[in-house]
Amino acid sequence: MLLLLLSCETSSVVYTPMCGLEVPSATATTVQPGEVVTLTTRPLTTLWDTAVTFGDQRIPPLSLDRSECASCDACIEESGCQTCGQTCSSCTELCSLCIETLSIEIPYVPAGTWPLQIVNHHGRSPVLNFTVEAAADSGTDSSP
């Protein structure tokens, strides 16, 4: 029995630093339920690795786009100098061309101010507040 306890193997876990995302910007922050909004922040990863919370609801991203980011990603990988979202000076020019966006649909929530936050492998974004207006009237009159 003692031999079995002594033969146990241990493993180590490598932790990557939690860096955070930049403050997101949005095409609009005064919105109506059902409206599609595009957010810009970085660093984004992939659609499956990205979670968005709106108030206390998790909402699925509709799309994630990293336009013109391949050269930046290759430069960072080759140089090995990225730490917490900060790229090395040799990649700055290539990375300035990279535009990272995420589209979401505003959930059907009561009118008011609602916080939005994005989370991925790199960490969390600061909160971006949205003002949700009452849903637009359908234009039909239900009175007799």
Image (spheres, rainbow, N blue to C red):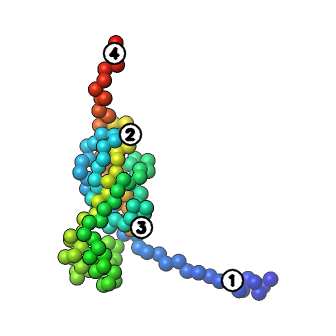
Compare residues 141 and 76 and report the one nearer the observer: 141
Q: Quadrant of residue 64?
A: bottom left
Q: Secondary structure at mark 3?
A: loop
Q: CA distance from mark 3 to mark 4?
A: 52 Å
Q: Residues within 10 Å of mark 3 (few under 14, many from 20)?
A: some
In the image, which is nearer the foreground, mark 2 or mark 1?
Answer: 2
In the image, which is nearer the foreground, mark 4 or mark 1?
Answer: 4
Q: CA distance from mark 2 to mark 3?
A: 28 Å
Q: CA distance from mark 4 to mark 2?
A: 25 Å
Give the answer, above or below, for where 28 lies relative to 80: above
Decide which of tag 4 and tag 2 comes sooner along the chain: 2
Residue 105 x, y percent position in the rendering: 35, 47
Query: Badge 2 is on which residue?
Result: 108
Residue under the point 24% across and 73% down: 95
Q: CA distance from mark 4 to mark 1?
A: 76 Å
Instruction: Inspect the image, locate mark 3, and give the three-letter code of the amino acid beneath it.
Output: His
Query: Badge 3 is on which residue?
Result: 121
Residue under the point 31% across and 20% down: 141
In the image, which is nearer the foreground, mark 1 or mark 3?
Answer: 3
In the image, which is nearer the foreground, mark 4 or mark 2?
Answer: 4
Q: Quadrant of the C terminus?
A: top left
Q: Residues within 10 Å of mark 2 (few under 14, many from 20)?
A: few
Compare residues 12 and 99 and report the one nearer the observer: 99
Residue 37 x, y percent position in the rendering: 29, 49
Q: Which mark is residue 143?
A: 4
Decide which of tag 4 and tag 1 comes sooner along the chain: 1
Decide which of tag 3 and tag 4 comes sooner along the chain: 3
